[in-house]
Image: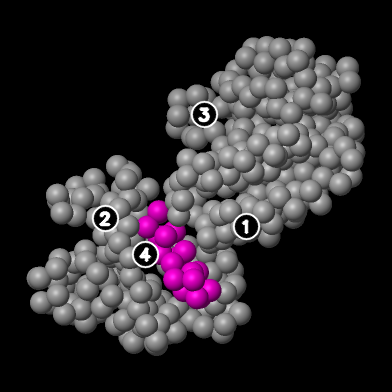
Amino acid sequence: MQAEIITIGDELLIGQTINTNSAWIGEQLELIGVKVYQATTISDNETHIINALNNAKRRVNLIIITGGLGPTKDDITKHTLCKYFDTELTLNRQVLSFLEKKYAELNLPFDETSKAQALLPKNCTVLPNTRGTASGMWFEKDNIVYISLPGVPYEMKGILTDEGFPKIKQHFTTEKVIHKTVKTVGVVESKIAKILTDWENELQQNNLKLAYLPSPGFVRLRISGIDKSGHLELYIEKKLNELKKLIGDYIYGYENDTLEKIVGELLLQKNKTVATAESCTGGTIAQLITSVSGSSAYYKGSIVAYDNAIKINVLNVLKPSIDKNGAVSQEVVEQMAINALSLLQTDYAIATSGIAGPTGGTEEKPVGTVWIAIASKQKVVSKVYHLSYNNRKRNIQVAANYALNMLRKVLLNEF
């Protein structure tokens, strides 16, 4: 059971749009036991599309295409598929009714261009798109399944999740693949790999794979295997318990957990609130916390004190402390956290002050130096991090993640 992904769009080839569709589809197919043989990106050109389909059908039995399904003249995928499958476009009444209702709800005019979205190849099975206007399409020919989807990631993901993947699992016989994901923070991939050498060797002896999936500040560990005996999940649970003993200090969650979600759940459990006082992170921590639905129950607000005058006049940081130690210092960041706690009347406060770069570093405090403090009514804890990234955005993101992890550890009495 193998698949090929074909993404269509000149904007992908010239780098104007980052091709995230292939990565997401490939990851999701793996989860349902479908191996991706190849991913191909081509231009909005009829000949290129037909050649790509002809090449793919020699290799795989599932072809997933994204892009080129919009209402404008440069969206040629539907017309090309009609030629490829020797069919014609016909008005789909069910899709037309859905579009008319959708446009009416949005108070938008429903013109001929909009109506054209209901013109679909006669021999396709429609995969409804509840998040947009371009329907997905399912074709079958010579024992090969072709799925055509809009290129907009939000719409493409919705169609595959709601319609495509269930239909693929129903149509094909796929092996039962089990994945377990462990989320870690504050440790590099090489250190984890060294700790887990023996543990990983035993996994491999039992036909399980361990993938290291690093991102700034994080490493995801994904255990994968084919369940032929029906007992694989029990064995993986045993190995996960062993993993906790080996790297439990770095594990913050599993599967789809996020650090901000875990921190929010801990605050809710303890009926506590938090505020932020951010300098180098510029509101990034606040954005992460408020990205979680229901965060208003525990998050009160933020003071982005980027300029020293704001630190002094709003956050009440003592000017002599800045003059003596600099804004990027333990004394200043602790005052920021303590005073934010008082000003915003919360149970906890997070504060950050650092040098995100690429300019502003000194020999004493190079780019990537970040002080983080967590204050409560009982105590204040602080730590300096020396981030090694030469990328400003990455330093900010990692600092924000480390700040949330510090709060998580304080809430668990581990810091």
Distance from Cα at disc 1 to Cα at disc 2: 30 Å
Mark earlier in primary sequence (3, 2): 3
User: In this figure, which residue is indicated by the disc labeled 3?
Assistant: 12
**The one of 107 and 246 positioned closer to us in this rendering:** 246
Q: CA distance from mark 4 to mark 1?
A: 33 Å
Residue placed at 56% from the left, 21% from the top?
A: 43
Label 1: which secondary element = helix
Magenta range is 398-415
Q: Is residue 352 magenta?
A: no
User: Where is residue 71 shown, x and y percent of the image?
Assistant: 63, 35
How far across and how far down the image is residue 131, in percent?
Answer: 68, 50
404 inside magenta stretch: yes
Name the residue type under label 3: Leu
Q: Which residue is mark 1?
A: 244
Q: Residues within 10 Å of mark 4 (few under 14, many from 20)?
A: many
Residue 220's place in the image compared with 250, above or below, is: above
Task: Report the residue at 15% width, 66% height from top.
Answer: 326
Q: Nearer the viewer, mark 1 or mark 3?
A: 1
* Type of the residue with mark 2: Thr
Front residue of 231 and 388: 231
| Helix, strand or loop status at disc 2 | strand
Which class describes the residues within 10 Å of circle 3: few (<14), some (14-19), or many (20+)? Answer: some
Mark 4 or mark 1: which is in front? 1
**Nearer-N-terminus badge (4/1):** 1
Residue 219 point in image, percent of width and height? 52, 47
Circle 4 residue: 283
Image height check: is 35 above or below 52?
Answer: below
Spatial CA distance of label 4 from label 3 is 31 Å
> Quick check: 356 left or right of 286?
left
On residue 369, which mark appears?
A: 2
